[in-house]
Amino acid sequence: MMQYSAEVRRWQLPDRGLPLGPRTLIMGIVNVTPDSFSDGGQHFRPESAIEHALRLETEGADVLDIGGESTRPGSEPVSVEEELRRVLPVMEELRRASKLPLSIDTRKAEVAGQALAAGASIVNDVTALGDPAMAGVVASTRAGVVLMHMRGDPKTMQQTPTYEDVVEEVCAFLETQVQVARAAGIRQDAIVLDPGLGFGKRTGRGVEDNVTLLRGLDRLVRLGYPVLVGASRKTFVGNLLGGRAVHERLEGSLAAAGYAVLRGARIARVHDVQATRRFLDVIDALRATDEPNP
Ligand code: HH2
C-alpha cells in the first residue's frame, strides 16, 4: 500500500486553512431534504434549514455541510434542478449570515459547481469523484474535498454488499480516488478521506463492517490524509444498542465518534453538534497527553 510522507496538518480551503491539530473538527449536518434518514423533512423549508444551521454554528460546529439529496439506503435520486432548488437559497443566505466554511454534500458536479459559486468552499462527495466532471470542478475552484467510500449506490447499496477484507478494500478504493484527484490537479492538502460508514457496509446478524472499519481506521489514517468519520445516528449504532430508534442513538454516536478520534480521525460529521463538541472537548484533552506531536 502506498505511503504518503507528510501528514496533512491543515485542511486547505480557497480562503482559509482549517487546523487539524489537537482539536477535532465538527462538521454539522444540514439536510434540506424531505426524506433523510434521521431528520428528513425537519428543515426542508429554506428558512428552517438556515435557522438550524445557525444554531449548529452557535453550538460549536466548524463546518456546515448542506445536502439536498438523501443518500440513505433505498433512497431515490433527485434531479440536478431539484437539488439546486433545495440547496442554493440556503447556501446563499448562510454565506451572508455565517462565518463558517460551507460544504456542499453532493455527488453531482453541476450542483457542486453552482454551490461553490454561491459560497461553498468544500465538496463532500459520497461517490469520491464518481461524476467524471467533479474532479475538474474541485481542482479549478481550489475547494476542499471529502472523498468517501461507498459500495454500489444508495438505492441498492444495502442489498448484498460483500467484502473479503473491508478495511483493505476501502483503503485501496480511496487510494485510487486520491490518484484521480491528484491527476486532475487537486492539491494534496485539499483532500480528506472517509470510510463511508453505513454506505454498502454489512450490519447486524453478526457481521459488522462498520465496526471492522472503525477498528482498522489507523490503516486509513496511515495513507497520510486527514480522516473524517460519519457515525452519527446510523443503523449500525442502533444495532449495537439492541435496535434503538434513530432518536435514541446519541450516546452510541458519541462513543463511535470518540473511538474514531482516538484511532486518528480528525473530523466528525454529526447531527448533534452541542453534545458532540462537549464530548470531544474532553476526548481531545485526554488524547493530547497520548500523542507527543498532536
Ligand atoms: N453520511 C450521510 C450523508 N453524507 N458524507 C460523508 N462524508 N460521510 C458520511 O458518513 C455521510 C455523508 C448520511 O447521513 P445523513 O446526511 O444524516 O442522511 P441522508 O443521507 O439520509 O440525508
Image (cartoon, rainbow, N blue to C red):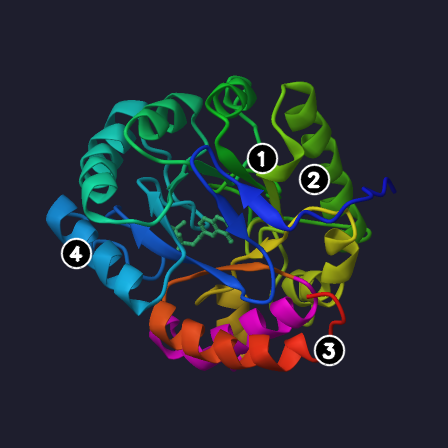
Q: Which residue carries the number 1 mark?
A: 128
Q: Which residues are magenta?
A: 241-264
Q: Which quadrant would the C terminus be assigned to in this image?
A: bottom right
Which of the two labelled residues, at mark 1 and mark 3, occupies the earlier sequence position?
1
Which of the two labelled residues, at mark 2 and mark 4, occupies the earlier sequence position?
4
Using the rendered image of the protein, determine whether residue 249 is visible from the camera's viewpoint.
Answer: no
Using the rendered image of the protein, determine whether residue 246 is visible from the camera's viewpoint.
Answer: yes
Q: Are marks 1 and 2 in contact (CB under 8 Å)?
A: yes
Q: Is residue 24 above or below residue 86?
A: below
Q: Residues within 10 Å of mark 2 (few under 14, many from 20)?
A: many
Q: SS of the residue at dot 1?
A: loop
Q: Residues within 10 Å of mark 4 (few under 14, many from 20)?
A: some
Q: Nearer the viewer, mark 1 or mark 3?
A: 3
Is 94 on the left-hand or right-hand side of 274?
Answer: left
**Amino acid at pointer 3:** Asp
Q: SS of the residue at dot 2?
A: helix
Q: Which residue carries the number 4 mark?
A: 51
Q: Is residue 163 above or below residue 241?
A: above
Q: Quadrant of residue 52?
A: bottom left
Q: Quadrant of residue 261?
A: bottom right
Q: Nearer the viewer, mark 3 or mark 2?
A: 3
Q: Which mark is residue 290?
A: 3
Q: Residue furthest right?
A: 1
Q: Residue at x 25, y 38 (%)?
A: 91
Q: Depth check: 26 or 237 in front?
A: 26
Residue 168 colored in magenta in the image? no
Mark 4 within 8 Å of ligand 1, using the beta carbon: no
Which of the two labelled residues, at mark 4 and mark 3, occupies the earlier sequence position?
4
Tell me the distance, in whole angstroms, between the alpha carbons under discs 1 and 3. 32 Å
Tell me the distance, in whole angstroms, between the alpha carbons under discs 4 and 3. 38 Å
Mark 3 within 8 Å of ligand 1, using the beta carbon: no
What secondary structure do most residues of the magenta stretch adopt?
A: helix
